[in-house]
Image (cartoon, rainbow, N blue to C red):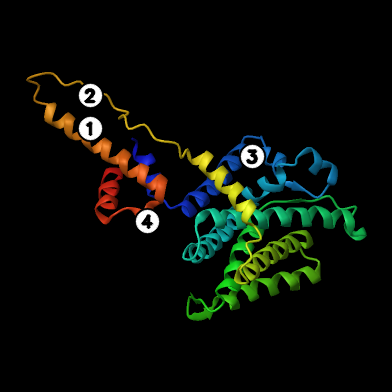
Amino acid sequence: MSRFQIKWALLGKLERFIAIQVGVFVVFGLLSLIGLPLYTYFELSSSLTAFIFKPWSLVTYSFLHHDLWHLIFNMLWLYYAGKFFLNFFDFTRLLSLFLLGVLFAGVTYVSAYNVIPSFASINSAMVGSSAGVMAVLIFMATYSPNQPVQLLFFRLKLWHLGLFFVLIDLLQLSSGINFGGRLAHLSGAGIGYFTASQLLKGNEVAEGFQRLVGVMLSAFSGNTSRSKKSPFSFKVYRGDSSKSKNTHQQTDQERIDAILDKISASGYESLSEDEKTFLFKKGS
């Protein structure tokens, strides 16, 4: 078990999701530096023809970002809103909501540029996870509006923050600045508001989609039974003074595997303080 694997196991699911987005940004950035701008195959084009030949871009655009500041801004707000969300719900619901915001924003973006006459001749492309982030943020601002939020010297309520971002998008939408992007943000916000308001009424409008995302997460995380066999091989000879040390190492590896199984089944939060301390020491 490598230190990287242990450190990865110590991350929560939200932190892993953010780390994946950062990793994608780094990989595509490096590819662009060596003259391989492959991100064009994953960004969402406003051209209906281009979209038909790249249907996957309806999701993949949300894993791309224009620049470092675009990435930092989105990931900070995803982390901030995501932490509030996970106080009430699990990660499967969070990812489902994020992806719903991304999907509906993508459909809105492509539709707008092919339906509104003044934009029909414009060929543009969209990247960024803002629509998914807005879906999570506005969901929480609707579901728990009076949640206190501390921003530097200001203490606000969560609905104040949600309203601020929606107003910014509405104002810039009316000015024509980044019309498609702002429309996508508002579409994501609309998904967040709709799902939260329906949930408060007792209606699970995205239950089927959540189950689908749950199945996908299980497949990717490999929630099949993990082999308990240690990846290290120890040869112990009679009379060898290293026998005790090897046995100790093997016991540690078995305990690490058991802890990682527990994380896979119930999440990092299910670990005891002793287990967390042990895993942290082995990963340091």
Please give the residue where the numbered disc 3 appears in the rendered image.
32
**Frontmost residue, 166 versus 261:** 261
| Within-10-Å neighbours for mark 2: few <14, some 14–19, many 20+ | few
What's under tag 2, amino acid-wise?
Phe
Tell me if label 4 and label 1 are in contact, CB under 8 Å. no
Rendered-image quadrant of the N terminus: top left
**Image position of 30 (left or right of 11):** right
Numbered label attached to residue 77: none
The alpha-carbon separation of the residues under discs 3 and 4 comes to 39 Å
Tell me if label 2 and label 1 are in contact, CB under 8 Å. yes
Numbered label attached to residue 250: 1
Q: Nearer the viewer, mark 3 or mark 4?
A: 4
Q: Nearer the viewer, mark 4 or mark 2?
A: 4
The residue under the point 78% across, 57% down is 108
Q: Earlier in the sequence, mark 4 or mark 1?
A: 1
The alpha-carbon separation of the residues under discs 4 and 2 comes to 32 Å
| Within-10-Å neighbours for mark 4: few <14, some 14–19, many 20+ | few
Q: Earlier in the sequence, mark 3 or mark 1?
A: 3
**Image position of 186 (left or right of 122):** left
Please give the residue where the numbered disc 4 appears in the rendered image.
269
What's under tag 3, amino acid-wise?
Ser
Q: Nearer the viewer, mark 3 or mark 2?
A: 2
Q: Earlier in the sequence, mark 4 or mark 2?
A: 2
Q: Earlier in the sequence, mark 3 or mark 2?
A: 3
Q: Position of residue 51 (x, y in %)?
A: 79, 43
The residue under the point 32% across, 38% down is 257
Q: Earlier in the sequence, mark 2 or mark 1?
A: 2
The alpha-carbon separation of the residues under discs 4 and 1 comes to 25 Å
**Image position of 228 (left or right of 167):** left
